[in-house]
Image (tube, grey):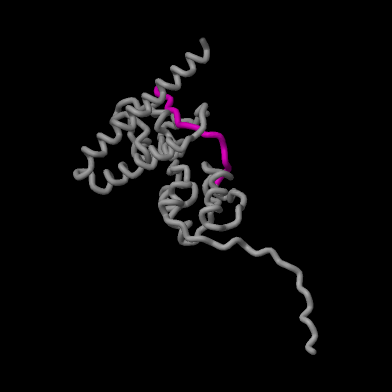
Amino acid sequence: MPAAAPATARTATAPPQLRPSVDAVDAALPQTQCTRCGYAGCRPYAEAIVAGDAINRCPPGGDATIAALARLTGRAVVALDPAHGEAAPFQVARINERWCIGCTLCIDACPVDAIAGGPKRMHTVLPALCTGCALCVPPCPVDCIDLVAAGRAWSPADAAAARDRFAVRNARKANPAGVEPDGRRLRQAAVAAALQRARMRRGGAAGGAS
């Protein structure tokens, strides 16, 4: 009778990997469009993840986003890659309007149309629309843009709105004559919605103080 094979120790196996849709992965990302992952926005990063790239390159999303991506892809949860930055509380950009020269470089850099202004006119950041991506800071020639605490958390509604504005801006850049009217209407609607949310927050704060 042949001898029994020697017992071997059990080894942990990696979870089976899944192949989610790009839309599903994109929906799990925070939509700040900061490019810190090394890609030109959240959707390009989602496409890369589906193709096999790492799930831990999103500092704005932090541990929560890594966990969500791990569930979607069937991969192990890993720590945020420090080469792409550190997770931090949500911040928004603020322009020191005394120093602004109206160069429009920050407007060109903003991926979600969150900065209002025109050439040689004072610019201002719309805090309700800003994703805190910080892409407007490096091109400012007079160093008049800072990041400040937003005083609130980044929400799924913020992410959805930022995704839409990012798509509209990219479409406008690709074909200005063809999409400008629709882009303008969507931007106006986004601004109106943001103003309404700000009024509701102020109303709630006033009610809580009374």
Q: Residue furthest top?
A: 210
Q: Residue at 44% x, 17% y: name it.
A: 203
The answer to which image quadrant residue 164 occupies is top left
x, y percent for residue 110? 38, 38
66 shown above or below 74: above
Q: Is 59 rendered above or below residue 3?
A: above
* Image location of residue 179, percent across then percent down: 23, 43
Q: How many marks?
A: 0
Q: Residue 198: horizontal and vertical position, in percent? A: 41, 23
Residue 90 located within the stretch drawn in magenta: yes
Give percent across and percent down for residue 19.
47, 60
Residue 169 falls left or right of residue 90: left
Magenta-drawn segment? 85-98
Please tell me which residue lies in front, 45 or 101.
Answer: 45
Image quadrant holding the N terminus, namely: bottom right
Residue lying farthest to the left in this orientation: 177
Q: Is residue 190 above or below residue 3?
A: above
Q: Is residue 141 left or right of residue 85?
A: left
Query: Which residue is rendered at x = 32% and y = 27% of the image?
Result: 192
Please say whether residue 72 is visible from this viewpoint: yes
Can you name the residue that lies furthest to the bottom here?
1
Which residue is most to the front? 1
**Does residue 101 appear anywhere in the picture?**
no
- Magenta stretch contains residue 84: no
Given residues 160 and 92, the one toward you in this image is 160
- Image point 33% across, 29% down: which residue? 191
Residue 179 left/right relative to 109? left
Q: Main secondary structure of the magenta part?
A: loop
The part of the image, by quadrant, that contains residue 197 is top left
